[in-house]
Image (spheres, coloured by chain):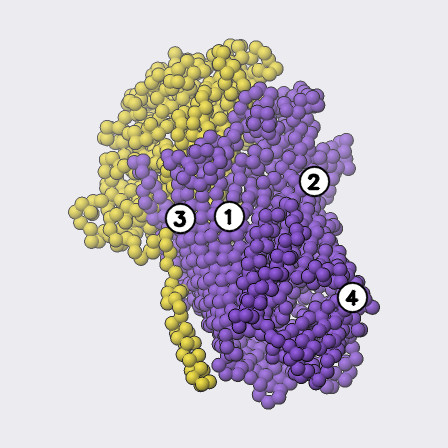
Amino acid sequence: MTKLIQRGFLKANLLLPRQYNNGRFHLPPFNTLFKKAVSSAYFMAALFFLCFTQMSFAATINGTVTGTGGTPLAGVSVNLKGTTTGASTNAEGRYSIAVPELSGTLVFSFIGYGNIEMAINGRSTVNIEMTEAASQLNDVVVVGYGRQKKVNLVGSVSTVTVDEKLTNRAVPNISSGLAGLVPGLAAVQNSGMAGNNTASLVIRGLGSVNGGSGPLLVVDGMPDVDINRININDIETVTVLKDASSASVYGSRAANGVILITTRTGKGQRKTSLNYTGNMSLTTPTNSMDFMNDYARALTLHQHRAAVNTLPGNQNFRNGTIDQWMALSMIDPIKYPNTDWWDVIMQNGSFQNHNVSATGGNENTNFFASVGVKDENGLQINNTYRQYNARFNFDAKVKSNMNVGFKFNGNWSDYKFALSEGFTDPDPGNTAGNDMQFAIAGVLPYDPKTGYFGGVMAYGEDPQAYNPYTLYINNLNYTNRQEVFTNLYYDWSPVKGLTARVDYNLNYYNQFRFTAPTPNTAYNFQTNSFGSRVYVGNNAGISNQTNTGFKTLLNARLSYNTKIGENHDFTGLFVYSEEYWKDRFQGSSRNDRLYPTLQEVDAALTDIQSTGGNSSVEGLRSYIGRFNYVGYNKYLLEANFRVDGSSKFLEGSRFGFFPSVAVGWRFTEEEFIRKHTNSFLSNGKLRLSYGSLGNNSGVGRYEQQETLNTLLYAVNGGVQRGFVNNKMINRFLSWETTTVLNAGLDLQFFNNKLTVAADYYDRLTTGMNRPSQFSILLAAAYSPAPRVNIGDLRNRGVELDVNWSDRVGKLKYGVGINASYNVNKLEKWNQFLGRGNIFLGMPYQYVYAFIDRGIAQTWQDVYNAAPQGASPGDVLREDLNGDGRITGEDQKAFRNTQQERPTTNFALNGSASYKGFDVVLLLQGAAGRKDYWLNNYNNTNFGTQRYASTYDHLNKTWSVENRGGEWPRLGGSGSNRTNSTFWLDDMSYLRVKNVQLGYTIPNNLIKRFGITNLRLVGSAENLVTFTKFRGLDPEGQGDDNSLYPINKSYSLAINLTF
Amino acid sequence: MNYKALFACIAIGSTLLLNGCRKDLLEAIPTTELAQNLFWNNEADATIALMGAYSATRAVFNRDYYLDGHAEFTRVRGTSATNGNLLRGDAYQGANYNPTGYGASFDKYYRYLYGAVNRTNYVIDNINRRLLPAAQGKSLTNLETILGEARLLRGMVYFRLISMWGDVPYLGREVFSNEEVAMLPRIPMKDVRDSILADFDYAIAKLPAKGEGIGRSGRPAALAFRGKLHLYWGSWKKNGWPELAGFTTNSAEAQASFTAAAADFKSVINDFGLTLFRNGEPGNIDALGEANILPNYYDLFTPRANGNPEMVMAFSHLGIPANPSQGEELMRDFSGRTIEGSQCWVSPRYEIADRYQLVATGEFAPKMVQLNPTTNTAARTIVNSAVNPNTYAGRDYRMKASIMWDFEKTIGLAALKSTGFSPFIYQTWAANVTINGVRYISYNTDGSNSGYVFRKFVRNYEGLGRSEGDFAWPAMRLADVFLMYAEATNEVLGPQADAVELVNRVRRRGNLPPLKAERFASYQTFFNAIEQERIIELVGEGQRGFDLRRWRAIERVWGAPGTAGVWRQDSWGANQQRFFQNTDDRTYQQNYIFRIPPGERDINPNLTQNTPWF
């Protein structure tokens, strides 16, 4: 044994230096990173080669493995059954395996093709043809607390296999990579900001008005993990559980569906392989505002606007000021700058992802190890996000009936940014968050000669105008976060069919955040003096905040599987689960930093300081059960339940019970159908499920506890403790319940070339918990008002997934379309609903808008409309109720249009491969949403000073000289900016989400370098978007302040396997 | 073997099921919040609860200066109040502070007033129920003091409610469920007044002569508020409140109220040895354009006056290191960017300037001439020009202490440090200017459209930021009591010698000579003199809007319905805003009474609306 281990170790030692010392990977910019990654991988690989055992051999079997149509299959693993002896096929499909004797059975396995066993029977040549059809029966899908055969699934479950098509794309995280891949799953990306570019995931529409309408995210059995911090390359599959039958094992948190992520293991791998994946891309914005970099002209726009109601003598800007600026800016750009801020604070972004993994295994053990680094540079200066990941998954067979395994995943990240949304910050406490509209061209960003940051200089200009550059240089936020996820399981099958398993998970995180702004004051280069605007005061200090916390999960499960007779398959599962969260915060800050390079709180004076700290815990105890029956391979029955008890609720309302039942019928297994359909239909299944799910996300951890709040007072110059009673508890508050009816049909035609899956669902959320509507007499004292379970919301929808794949000679291709349609309706609301865009019998947040009659061209147009204080150049609105006035009652409800989210999502993906070349195309789009295009940057009624106008303000606004102007006049009626159809845009879009072109280097060229696979891929993300929306991006949510577009990126990826 | 395994399995499984790993998994105990059932043990707890009530009540009184925008001399172009943050002025957030059109925008304020009612009820009921029955001796006295303070606060809040909305629902006890109040109707203002009087009576009986500390109240506060309630009641009964359904005038009742008011004020003035700040002396004043020495009236509105006997009742504040925010934002609201980046939401209107009388005569100066210095090069030197600093020479000391005109200086502040003097020059913001050979950066604000900014309430020394003020906001000031006493006695008996003397003591503060005899020759002339003093003495304190309404004086100031209205202008003569142009009767009515929140009427059919708001 020792000898064998030494051999294994030796092999690793011999192999690795040869591969890594040849210098081919020394890409200069990431040299060090890569070295780090490589050395870690080296270490892990070396460690794990120790686990391999080898044998001695007497005979050799050769053969060829081909796929349908006789094409050779490369990479098929061939094993001698019952041993660890194995080999794999080369590019011509040929293999050679050394066996002790010409007897026994060979097992051929290939991902997607399943396993085929073939007795040797004394042959020294064994050729076989594998077909994909053979695999279908054996495909398994990850479901909650286990795996199930795909053919026997009765719930609505979609799976995404994370393969090269996804990992080669320049998607920064898994959530944004899921867009367009799963029918019924909307992945909406609001921003392309580095570190803040995750997509919000919504399954089957808005499940609750509570805000918590995102799905439950489960990574390797652990709920509530931030999936965006998982290395995409580590992910094997993403499973989306959409209906009650599949999701109800997650009970009180599954109302909005569940997404299960499974990471890679070495299971099924017979061969150890090392894999490098690298991805480098350049990112540019898909769209941006066209701010005017011509200050003199921007000032004339101010004049135009002011001329509406201000005499020239009383206007802020004089002709002289403007003329002077126009003339002198041509010769003195320091004193008379025309700054193009976009140019100053923007850059081309970049994105890099490097990942090294090792995977392997044998009969008794298998492992997967990986290290990765992700490096993002945002579109603005000083916005970076860097994340490192390491993963280690290991399983071992302790005894023939016992397995143990552990997973370790660590990630740490460094995030640097100026404003939380990139250019803006929604926090009302941060005035800079709203200031981009005040970034006038007449401010010099910075003068390297003096080291001063520019401020306002023009006579009459508001000294509070904004210099974004100083913010992006001097006012940065830094967040460092580390997370560790560990998982340990032990399973034991004491008797046949019975398995007991215990899982224990511990997740830990630590986050440190600091800000340490650098003092600076606006400088006036014309007068050579500091202006009055202090960007950061001289007493600027340091703020440090630490968040730490952990979550534990204990699962104990018992499953039993038995077959009664030939045709009755029963499976039962019972799980007991405990989850526990604890989070802690501490923060402190001091004024007066000692020196601008220091950043921890001790590096500041102690005279003025503040501190804060708190912690909270939560517990969840659950009992889960599942029963499956498969009769005659065609009658399917599944029943699930989960009982959840949460510390968020009071005794009596604490436990929730979430049952579901589902039936399925594989009708193509019925002889009387099969004989008619067999020629074209290979598989057909009807599914029906019904059940209930819960949602507790809207309730705070201690919200239901009867506690007093502090409200302090001051007496004699000192703080006095003060307590007030803020809480009036609703003792009966409990979960929101969602019941889902799902009917589905799965069909596979023409030997599985064409697969169709269609689903219809009706999802009713009852008892949505909302703050109750308190009398105004209590509303201030008891705030927030206790929550009550009110309101019913129904979502109905259909989903369709159609895929075709075939092969013509050496050309292999596939086309898939998926689409989903969802409408919701508010059915019950037990409180007063005022006039607005929420009402009974209507979609939640439908469009409620004034109808416009266009821009008034003449006074006659104004007289013809209802009186509304308009002049020519203003938007006229219809008097819908004919009362001669324009009031809120003249708005129209658009019954079928939603303002916040589309009704239809669709995607088309295509792929083809020919010899070593392959192409992938993903189109994605949405329809059924309209929203107003009204934001701070297309304001025609801007203030009297410091407005950063765009060229559209110059060219598009209506005036007597520009009667065709698309925008109303400058400084017109305030109602020009109301929610009217004038600004209502159709948010439908079609986007070329991804295009990839790959080339796999022929095996014979790279074989001698020890390389089994080398693939190069060029990929482009968000290449083109077709939309009628006039704003930045039709996918984003409405916010009159937000400015961050999503990114367009071009990348080059390398996959390398040894 | 298999059975053994199975047994072991079941044993482990059932142990887990029955016990779990964490027994207290579902019992999460808050770590920073006190459970309700652990409170209310003793007097100390009562004090802690009272502090909560003080804080909640402070939040509906300490930004009353915004309410000055409802009259003609102060412009409130916005507020610094943070939405959703009680201690940062949420009660005042989002309301309209123009001279007209404001009546429908005080739903939030209404809500927070009732918030304060609930806080005081919580103290009153729990003391009565849990502590008082067993209390005796010193403890009983202490509890009664706490109770008295809570009842004073509750009375003040209801007084504010009726003075804006007339009839209101009355909530006199702790509430335990929404059902208890959901259908409450409004009750006649008189009944509410009687409950307020009961609260004030109790407070007067139980409070000590001096409050327990700066920020807590003593008996004079309760007396002064009872007097003010009588005064307002007298005004309403005399002048009428036609917008309030069912309310009728009654001169006998008015007289009785004025008499009662005078008695209460007299007691405040005479029985507690209270004096005006620094004895009401004007103090010293610097030369025009200089600000090293400022009159006493200026100091009165800085923390130097905290705890002064003139502050009959004040809500106190703390700057850093108070956490969470106990500071006031007077500086942020009343001054410009030059001072800690302040926002100048509140500024004097041009028209106040002519109201400041001459020290020499005690009478008004000739009306100033407004000139534009960018088009008229002589504007700075023409006699009596509003932009000629010399025009402001020899005025009421309170002018320099309250407002700044062109070339008046103040201390600039940034990052808690002084940046030196900065001269205010209207429309020349943050510019380099040289005055007497010294270079300055002029005052910067985008908040003034009149030619003036406030000096009153703005600290001129370093150390605290714009949101960290530590001035105790006066809810009742002795000077106000003097003037209210004069008004009440004038209503009953006409000008009285002691009343005239008190008005003269207020004028003395501005270094003005006593009133000339003709100024108190009749009820009307004396009333005018009192009104003039109220305008100057109380500017920016939120009193004038209430005065205009209870005196039915909106038409007197702005003209009758349907007339041309009145422009507000600036010192250059430019028109800024015109109010009450061709305004209908309904709008006037809506300015006299506030709107009952319609959202509440949607859910409570018993709640009636004030007539102009139907």
- Structural crowding at the residue carrying mark 4, measured as other residues with C-alpha within 10 Å and reported as few (<14), some (14–19) or many (≥20): some
Q: Nearer the viewer, residue B14 or B200?
A: B14
- Describe the element under mark 2 as helix, strand or loop: strand
Residue pointed to by mark 4: A812
Disc 4 and disc 2: Cα gap in Å?
56 Å
Task: Please tell me which residue is depicted at 44% across the width and 41% down the height of the picture.
Answer: A600
Q: Is residue A245 left or right of residue A904?
A: left
Of the residues under marks 1 and 4, which one precedes in the sequence? 1
Residues flagged by tags 4 and 2 on a common chain: yes
Q: Is residue A652 visible?
A: yes
- Where residue B525 appears, x then y in whole percent? 39, 21
Residue at the spot 71% in from the left edge and 35% down from the top edge? A951
Residue situated in front as seen by the camera: A414 or B258: A414
- For the question of whether residue A989 can be seen, the reply is no
Q: Is residue A429 left or right of residue A709?
A: right
Disc 2: host chain = A
Number of marks in the rendered image: 4
Residue A439's spot in the image, x, y percent? Answer: 61, 33
3 or 2: tag closer to the N-terminus: 3
Disc 3 or disc 1, which is closer to the eye? Answer: 1
- In the rendered structure, the colour chosen for chain A is purple
Q: Earlier in the sequence, mark 2 or mark 1?
A: 1
Packing grade of label 3 (10 A; few <14, some 14-19, many >=20) is few
Which image quadrant for residue B505?
top left
Q: Is residue B88 left or right of residue B224?
A: right
The answer to whether residue B42 is above or below residue A685 is above
> In the picture, which chain is yellow?
B
* Mark 1, secondary structure of its residue: strand
In this view, the residue farthest toward the right is A809
- Please state, as top left, top right, bottom left or bottom right, where the C terminus of chain A lies in the image: bottom right
CA neighbours of label 2 inside 10 A, class few (<14), some (14 to 19), many (20+): many
